[in-house]
Amino acid sequence: MQATGTLADRQSRRPAEARRRRPDLGRAMTLAGLAMPAIVLMTVVNAYPVVYAGIQALHDGDLLNLGSFVGLANFRDALTDPLFWWSARFTVIFSLCGVFGSWLVGFALALLLKPEFPGKSSFKILLLLPWIVPIVVSSMSWNWLTATPTSLLPVLAQDLGFGRVMFLADPTMAMITVCLFKIRISYPFMMMMMSAALEGIEPNLYEAARVDGANSRQQLRYIVLPMTARSTYIAWILMAMFSVNDFATIYLLTGGGPVDSTTSLIVLAYRSVFQDFRPGYGVAISFLMTGALVTLSIILFRQIRRANIA
């Protein structure tokens, strides 16, 4: 009798549940109908440049004409071009310096500017200035400091006994200068990301670690680094994308020279399209860059998932 009653109750509840679902389904359909024009518009706006760029990569045209179909010849030419691989090498160096150099500086400053640090808000504002100042102003100031033999840093290096150091005219020094400039303008972003991550750690963990006799290095290794791993990986992904696609920092400081020593893939793509008038070749380089970035992002997102499990 009890089972029969339970079955009867279920049958009596089904119409009521069906009535409750109908308005939800209708509401969902209405919302989907209202959102559909915006979704279609955004899809078309975002997909059109990508599709057109893909078509350009398969042709050998110029800026005005699409040209004839060449298949994957532009990709083949890029992968067999020594300048492409040199640019890829410098892009990796530039990105590694941008990601890990700025992370080390930003993380160290975030650890230093803890809540108990006096005047930390004022210091953070001052340290954010390299990120706030327009890149044109920053690059001009570095040009003023390093570009000519009579600039401040070459004169200072000569007075200190290092000889005549050409920061932007020597290929090796130009690469070092560009990487240092990238770290300088990127560390404020890392500092803000890591400061937010550090503020999310419960102070009780530090107190418990001190009670157990853990020193500062052990707290850093077993508390700070694991607890900030998720934010660290996200910051690395974002900075890697910023660095690989960073055109202004390199072009405004060195223009990709001297003798292509600071030519990154994005600078090479720009030159191919707007100076050599080979849009198909330049777009092919951009697609290869995109593939590398997607692969790197997938790897780092897997690390984020592991950090969440931990």
Image: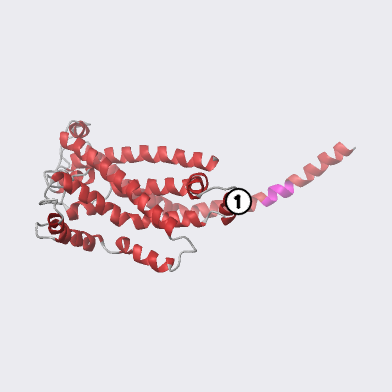
Q: Where's the C terminus, which quadrant?
A: top right
The image shows residue 29, relative to residue 130, as above or below, that is: above
The image shows residue 229, relative to residue 79, as above or below, that is: below
The image shows residue 1, relative to residue 142, as above or below, that is: above
Name which residue type carries label 1. Answer: Val
Colour theme? secondary structure
Residue at horizontal 49 percent and vertical 50 percent from the top: 216
Q: Where's the N terminus, which quadrant?
A: top right
Report the front residue among 96 and 122.
Answer: 122
Q: Mark 1 points at which residue?
A: 211
Magenta-highlighted residues: 15-20
Report the front residue among 50 and 266.
Answer: 266
Residue at horizontal 57 percent and vertical 51 percent from the top: 210
Q: Quadrant of residue 192?
A: bottom left
Question: Which percent across, then down, holds residue 195?
Answer: 45, 57
Residue at horizontal 34 percent and vertical 46 percent from the top: 100
